[in-house]
Amino acid sequence: MIKSLITGGAGFIGSHVAKHCLAMGHEVVVLDDLSGGFEDQVPQEALFVRGSITDQKLLAALFEEYQFDYVYHLAAYAAEGLSHFIRNFNYNNNLIGSVNLINESVKHKVKCFVFTSSIAVYGQGQLPMREDMTPIPEDPYGVSKYAVELDLKAAHEMFGLNYIVFRPHNVYGENQNIGDKYRNVIGIFMNQIMQNKPLTIFGDGTQTRAFSYIDDVAIPISKSVNIEQAYNEVFNIGADQPYTVNELAKVIGDNFGVKPDIKYLQARNEVQHAYSDHQKAHSTFEVGGAVPLEKGIQKMAAWAKQVGARASSEFDNIEITENLPQGWEVKQEEVIK
């Protein structure tokens, strides 16, 4: 029996990867601290362990007990814009936690370490983003992701640990945490509509993103360990067609039968345009065309209507308040001293 560890498997992408790994016949152990996921999203056939990748003793015990063949590492606090203001938290969870997993994978001879990185590694002005470009990340989240990529390359060269890196972007779909106000604009918009609130857009809404439906990402990630030519390679993965945030708001409003009431906020420091070239993934994984935005939004909207609105979560460990974007303000007593 193939044994796989899936970190972040109670979260959005991780829960879908867990489902597909189980369908491939893997014995799946899900590790998640539930900081952004939900236990009821873990597939019933998987073994759920509540814990953090920052807990070295727990990781050592899990690797010793299960002797995993594969590690799918999806656990992260992926609020890119917020990462400027939670630098210590960001690097501990997204970099040090990942290194803990890499250490155990080396020690226990894991066959392949599948890492979910991000197009945040590219930074500004490299369009379309291609894997042969030199990453120049512009925020702590992107820096942490690229550092893990580099560490995996070093671990492969020193110890022979095989890896596969995926750089997805703007993924949406069922099981997304629509109550998180710091990330995932599609979930934020749907949550706001269901609460009869205006849709909040930073800047004028002309910034563009290529929004990726979950199946276009989770299925190739799950199956990648079976494709030998994918080993020790980096892949952009997701949708090709960029849309403005204004266009996105209209598509979501149409699916909820409303004309969005948009509240424009002060622009934040973010990449204005982001979309990737996916030719390498298309040829390696033989994936077809991406799910069109209208169809994917329709699927997610149907799910969101079933689960209903969720209270927006507040991040209670803000480390720096200077230049914090409008709407993200915190009470002074919540700031880490």
Image (spheres, grey):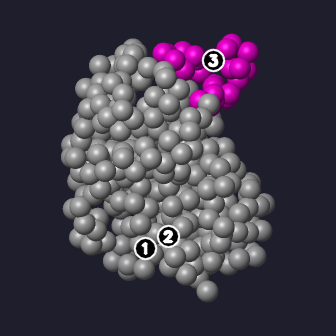
Circle 1 SS class: helix
Question: What amino acid does circle 3 point to?
Answer: Val
Real-space Cα distance between discs 3 and 2?
Answer: 39 Å
> Would residue 270 appear left or right of 41 to someone viewing this image?
left
Q: Position of residue 140 (x, y in %)?
A: 49, 36
Q: Is residue 313 left or right of residue 220?
A: right
In 3D space, how far apart are the residues under numbered discs 3 and 1 (Cα atoms)? 42 Å
Q: Which residue is mark 2?
A: 20
Amino acid at dot 1? Lys
Circles 2 and 1: CB atoms closer than 8 Å = yes
The overriding secondary structure of the stretch rendered in magenta is loop
The magenta stretch spans residue 118? no
Please name the residue that numbered disc 1 is placed on.
223
Q: Is residue 263 above or below residue 308?
A: above
Residue at the disc numbered 3: 330
Using residue 57 as the reference point, say whether residue 3 is left or right of it.
left
Determine the image quadrant of residue 14.
bottom right
Q: Residues within 10 Å of mark 1 (few under 14, many from 20)?
A: some
Q: Is residue 15 above or below residue 198?
A: below
Outermost residue, front side: 257
Q: Which numbered circle lies on residue 207?
A: none
Q: Residues within 10 Å of mark 3 (few under 14, many from 20)?
A: some
- N-terminal of the pair, mark 3 or mark 1, is 1
- Magenta segment range? 312-337
| Residue at disc 2, secondary structure | helix
Q: Nearer the viewer, mark 3 or mark 2?
A: 2
Residue 120 position, x and y percent, is 39, 42
Q: Residue at x 61, y 86 (%)?
A: 1
Work out whether residue 303 or residue 157 is closer to the camera in this orientation and state it. Answer: 303
State the residue in front, 336 or 238: 238
In primary-sequence order, the first of circles 2 and 1 is 2
